[in-house]
Image (tube, rainbow, N blue to C red):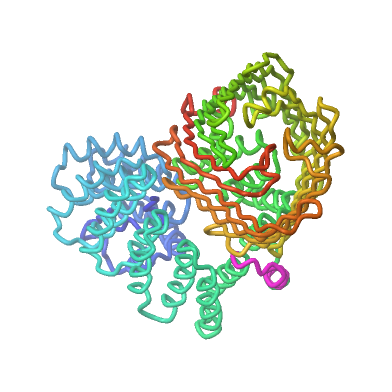
Amino acid sequence: MKFLEKICFSIALIITAACFSQNMQEGFQYLETGKFDKAEVFFQKILVDYPENKTANLCYGRAVGLNGNAQKAVGIFTELLKEYPKDLEIELNYAESLLWGSQFEKAKGYYTTLVEENPTNFAALLGFANTFSNLKEYENALIYVNKALEVSVKNPNAMVSKKYIRLGYANEFVQKQNYNKALSLLNENLIDFPNDKETLLNKVNIYLMTKETANATKIYEQIATNAKDSLLALNGLALVAHIDENDKNALEISKTALLKSEIVKDTTLTKQTFERYTQALIWNRKFKEAETNIHNLLTDYGTENWILALRATLGMYRSDFKETIADYKQILKKDSLSFDGNLGSTNAYFANGEINKAYKGVFKTLGIFKNQKDAQGFLEKINKNYTPFIEEKLSYTFDNGDNVAYSTFTKITFPINTSLSFSANYEYRKTENTVSKNEAKSNNFNLELQYQFHPKIIFNAKAGISRANSYSNEYNQLLAEVFFKMKPLKLQDLEIGYKREVQNFNADLVDKEIASNNLILNYNLSTNFKFGWYTQYLYTTQTDDNERNLLFTSLYYNFLSKPAFKGGLNFQHITFKNQVPTVYFSPEKFNAVEVFIEISKNDKKLFYSLNAATGYQYIEDQPKQSTYRIQAKLGYNVSDRLITNVYGTRSNIASATAAGFTFTEVGFVLKWYLTRQPNFLKKFIK
């Protein structure tokens, strides 16, 4: 906290009784009322006639320094000290002039001696406290401001300094995320300064960061004591509603604030109200209205940074990442220290697949805003994608064809950098039929490479061996997978690939040694009006000379974003060239139609998802059959590095398995990050 910008250090204006002679009274008034430019001119004229006058020189030095020329003031007091060595009045002014020029370390050394020699001098003690505060040594600052208050009880200048020292000290604890200590300091301020707005706003910012929305609401209600502060509080309450995941309420509050701003007519608050209202429109996905509002603001105010930030936010919500990045670049060109510009562009680079730029951006942001919670959280988010991990999955499957299976799957992934990573996985599966007693085991081992050679294109390649043995057969088969994952246009995802696999759902299938070669096309189209469309097509050739065509398409609607809740209609069509019903489900024609809902949420500790569907399936010319499908997952983040979940699925859709049986699977997943951060991270830290 730079106190030089908050209060005038009038406490060091210690002048002799003679100083108050009538002919200099006008100049003293200028100093006391903050008219430093006039004071400078006045005392400069006095010194023309009285160049040796100590008082006039002192006052001229103060006027010069407080008028913005600290370096010249230091020179004036330095010369005076040569003429009047050990003059306490001049020493105090010299020490204060060092603070005006932000020479805090030099001031600290000087005040150390000054306080040792004058341990009960109020001006020296308070100056020392303010020096410590500017150096962010708040513990010492509090010690010396309290000593100053012992000398001059309840002195208003010392009390104001103490207030800002506490505010700075509280902010330091906020950066360390020690919110309880920060709140304790702010509460001490409120004892000395009841209902102090600056202190209350610092408190509410903590509650917003910790998502204590009830406490934040109370503070804003406490602040709303007049028309202007009521408008400020409404803008804050709209943000509280957004944090509380009630965006509709946020928009209603913003509309009320917009009407109130027409009455209050405060330029700064009006801008803040327009800003919050536009944000609320974006939160509610009213993009056309937000776009119109931003256009009007640009017409009225020009390309101010806060308006560019609104347009960039709209771009992020619409997935217009290139336009968003351009807006943030424009913001940073005007203000390189802008928090919105630095962290906002970092988010946009990440969303656009430019990971290296995102890393550089987040470290730049943290370099400017040390330990800032949002930036720190974003860094952890990126790191999770590139930190080595091991994943273990255990599952148990059974169906109404008397088949049971036990499976374990282990995967280890090592990212080399933001573009390249390698993985190895091993799967063991044992299956048996409890009636026929036929059983089989399969061991699959794969090596995988993932390479991002363009922000919009990722290449995946996997190769391995499947070793199987059953009640009458033993063999090895090649496993392979090649995929290109692309984002051809905004809001579109496309996957094209090939996959070779061995059918191992039950013991009889393992025994048949059927390998399938799949050509796969996956396409997803999202929209800015909540609808989406997903399609998958597979063409499969098998080593038993059979062929399959599979088309799955889903039209869905996103009802909510928090928790994520969507629903829609699915259609599936399958054909097989050859029908071999005694071996596996292979109709000449199969169709299924179902409606589904899906809900999911990922909190800091707990996460869950549920997908349920019901409908009808049509197998060749048979009568339609009702179907159902349910999948559920419940997980827990044990720590930053350890995640676990349990899951279950049950379905009677014939195409759900190679055998076509109603089946159930339950399982347990454990994921452990092997290190705290990516191994390559140091190259981004400067």
Q: Position of residue 160 (x, y in %)?
A: 28, 59
Occupied quadrant, residue 62: bottom left
For the residue pair 287 and 296, the one nearer the viewer reads as 287
Q: Is residue 129 left or right of residue 363?
A: left
Q: Position of residue 90 (x, y in %)?
A: 28, 46
Residue 390 shows in the view: yes
Question: Residue shown at 54%/42% (left/top)?
Answer: 664
For the residue pair 165 and 580, the one nearer the viewer reads as 580
For the residue pair 642 and 102, the one nearer the viewer reads as 642
Q: Is residue 257 above or below residue 69?
A: below
Q: Is residue 57 above or below residue 137?
A: below
Residue 367 shows in the view: no
Q: Position of residue 13 (x, y in %)?
A: 28, 56
Question: Residue shown at 32%/45% (left/top)?
Answer: 178
In the rendered image, the residue lying farthest to the front is 436
Q: Main secondary structure of the magenta part?
A: helix
Q: Is residue 1 left or right of residue 296?
A: left
Q: Position of residue 677 (x, y in %)?
A: 50, 28
Question: Residue shown at 72%/36% (left/top)?
Answer: 584
Find the magenta span and give its range.
283-297
Q: Is residue 286 magenta?
A: yes
Q: Is residue 600 magenta?
A: no
- Identify the image quadrant of the C terminus: top right
Question: Residue shown at 35%/35% (left/top)?
Answer: 106
For the residue pair 30 and 672, the one nearer the viewer reads as 672
In the rendered image, the residue lying farthest to the bottom is 263
